[in-house]
């Protein structure tokens, strides 16, 4: 059911909005915990056809040939990632994460990082996604 809804939303978005495309994504995960041996935990590059769609106060990024959706909302500020199986992860600014999305030239950068207000019981990890050609 979730996948059908995701496909319907994608079809609607594609029909009414320009489609900037990216061929690569670099996902870099950071460890901000005091016990961290290294700041960067991992960095992974994916090649695919990523399409960006901006609708109202949200940016949607998805792979053209799969049901992967990456949604960045500005109000409320949050990042939601849903994979092809409908499994999702969500990071919300109100829960102590700084969420940003910005363009640097032809590169779209989306990131979430813990802040001073992130609860002590939460491990301090963050991720940066760079979409580019």
Image (cartoon, rainbow, N blue to C red):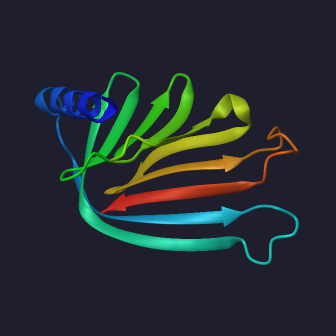
Q: Is residue 1 left or right of residue 114?
A: left
Q: Is residue 16 left or right of residue 52?
A: left
Please give the count of numbered marks on the rendered protein. 0
The residue that appears at 83% across and 43% down in the rendered structure is: 116
The residue that appears at 20% across and 28% down in the rendered structure is: 8
Q: Is residue 81 above or below residue 65?
A: above
Residue 107 percent across, percent down from the top left: 36, 57
The residue that appears at 45% across and 46% down in the rendered structure is: 102
Residue 117 percent across, percent down from the top left: 82, 37
Q: Is residue 64 above or below residue 55?
A: below
Choose top left, top right, bottom left or bottom right for residue 128: bottom right
Q: Is residue 85 left or right of residue 73?
A: left
Q: Seen from this angle, which residue lies furthest left?
A: 15
Residue 125 percent across, percent down from the top left: 70, 56
Choose top left, top right, bottom left or bottom right for residue 38: bottom right
Q: Is residue 75 above or below residue 53?
A: above
Point out the image quarter for the C terminus: bottom left
Q: Is residue 118 left or right of residue 54?
A: right
Residue 41 percent across, percent down from the top left: 65, 72
Point out the image quarter for the N terminus: top left
Relative depth, front residue between 87 and 12: 87
Q: Seen from this angle, which residue lies furthest bottom?
A: 37
């Amino acid at each position: 059911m979730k996948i059908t809804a995701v496909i319907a939303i994608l079809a609607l978005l594609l029909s009414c909005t320009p489609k900037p495309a990216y061929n690569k994504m670099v996902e870099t995960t950071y460890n901000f915990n005091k016990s961290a041996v290294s700041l960067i935990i991992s960095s992974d590059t994916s090649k695919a056809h990523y399409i960006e769609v901006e609708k109202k106060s949200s940016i949607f990024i998805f792979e053209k040939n799969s049901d992967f959706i990456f949604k960045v909302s500005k109000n409320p500020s949050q990042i939601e990632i849903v994979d092809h199986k409908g499994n999702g992860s969500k990071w919300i600014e109100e829960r102590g994460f700084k969420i940003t999305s910005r363009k640097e030239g032809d590169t779209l950068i989306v990131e979430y990082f813990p802040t001073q207000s992130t609860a002590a019981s939460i491990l301090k990890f963050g991720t940066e996604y760079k979409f580019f050609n």
